[in-house]
Image (cartoon, rainbow, N blue to C red):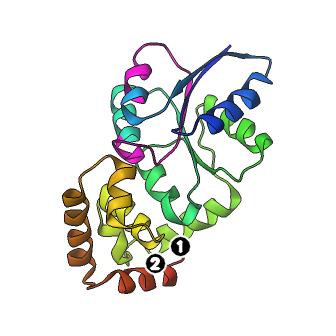
């Protein structure tokens, strides 16, 4: 029997995932976490078989949560289910220890297939993501500038290029406007850019938006 922990800040998403999972005859328990702190708290309260983790939730970044889960529970597979396309986060998530990466556009059948795969101790990688990984490995000695950003800086960069204001990003991440402004300054410094417009142009050229 399988015990799954769902971590997503949207109740309607959690409810939909629960319905999908409970259609499986061997699903025993489905836990729910609405933010990063709840994920880490609930992870230690039961012997979960799998965590289905959204990469953007209030509080700590999903990649930070993923790394802590991998450190504290190395045998616990974490499947990322994100609204962000593979180009934006998949490689980073897999490098951080994710057992697989799916977008929320995936069909329920693919989610179950991915779960079955990672529960067997394997990685779940879609064919499109396999191509991206191959491309990443081929040019590993020629990294794109955005790959030098920390995970949190990268998350802020993605949110800026999606059109969110500093205030909106601060609210979404439960951080101060000053902190987000500091991240923005670091992004510009590391990437040698001077404005949001230049950052957005770069992201478009790299298919990050």
Residue 96 in percent (x, y) is at 40, 47
Label 1 environment density (alpha carbons within 10 Å; few <14, some 14–19, many ≥20): some
Q: Nearer the viewer, residue 139 or 184?
A: 184
Q: Is 180 on the left or on the right of 20, as rendered?
A: left
Q: Is residue 66 above or below residue 182?
A: above
Q: Nearer the viewer, residue 153 or 180?
A: 180
Residue 94 in percent (x, y) is at 48, 50
Q: Secondary structure at mark 1?
A: loop
Q: Nearer the viewer, residue 154 or 49?
A: 154
Badge 2 vs badge 1, beta-carbon distance below 8 Å: yes
Q: Quadrant of residue 180?
A: bottom left
Instruction: Please give the count of numbered marks on the rendered protein.
Output: 2
Marks 2 and 1, how far apart at CA: 6 Å
**Is residue 151 covered in magenta?**
no
Q: Is residue 202 above or below residue 24?
A: below
Q: Residue at x 51, y 72 (%)?
A: 208
Q: Earlier in the sequence, mark 2 or mark 1?
A: 2
Q: Is residue 196 above or below residue 113?
A: below
Q: Is 128 on the left or on the right of 79, as rendered?
A: right
> In the image, which residues are magenta?
39-64
Q: Residue at x 19, y 60 (%)?
A: 178
Label 2 environment density (alpha carbons within 10 Å; few <14, some 14–19, many ≥20): some
Residue 161 in percent (x, y) is at 44, 73
Answer whether residue 116 is visible to the viewer in this image.
no
Q: Residue at x 40, y 69 (%)?
A: 160
Q: Residue furthest front?
A: 167
Q: Which residue is mark 2?
A: 203
Q: Which residue is mark 1?
A: 209
Q: Secondary structure at mark 2?
A: helix
Residue 46 in percent (x, y) is at 47, 13
**Is residue 57 covered in magenta?**
yes
């Amino acid at each position: 029997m399988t015990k799954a922990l769902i971590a997503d800040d949207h109740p309607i998403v959690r409810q939909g995932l629960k319905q999908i999972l409970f259609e499986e005859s061997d699903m025993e328990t489905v836990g729910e976490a609405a933010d990063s702190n709840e994920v880490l708290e609930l992870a230690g309260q039961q012997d979960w078989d799998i965590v289905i983790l959204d990469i953007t939730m209030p509080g700590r970044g999903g990649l930070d949560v993923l790394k802590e889960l991998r450190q504290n529970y190395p045998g616990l597979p974490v499947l990322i289910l994100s609204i962000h396309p593979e180009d934006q986060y998949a490689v980073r998530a897999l490098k951080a220890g994710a057992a697989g990466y799916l977008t929320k556009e995936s069909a329920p059948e693919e989610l179950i297939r991915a779960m079955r795969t990672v529960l067997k101790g394997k990685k779940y990688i879609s064919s499109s993501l396999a191509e991206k990984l191959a491309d990443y490995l081929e040019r590993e000695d020629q990294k794109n500038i955005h790959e030098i950003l920390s995970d949190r800086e990268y998350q802020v960069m993605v949110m800026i290029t999606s059109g969110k204001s500093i205030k909106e990003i601060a609210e979404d991440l439960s951080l101060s406007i000053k902190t987000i402004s500091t991240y923005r300054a670091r992004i510009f410094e590391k990437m040698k850019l001077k404005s949001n417009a230049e950052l957005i142009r770069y992201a478009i050229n790299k298919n990050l938006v």
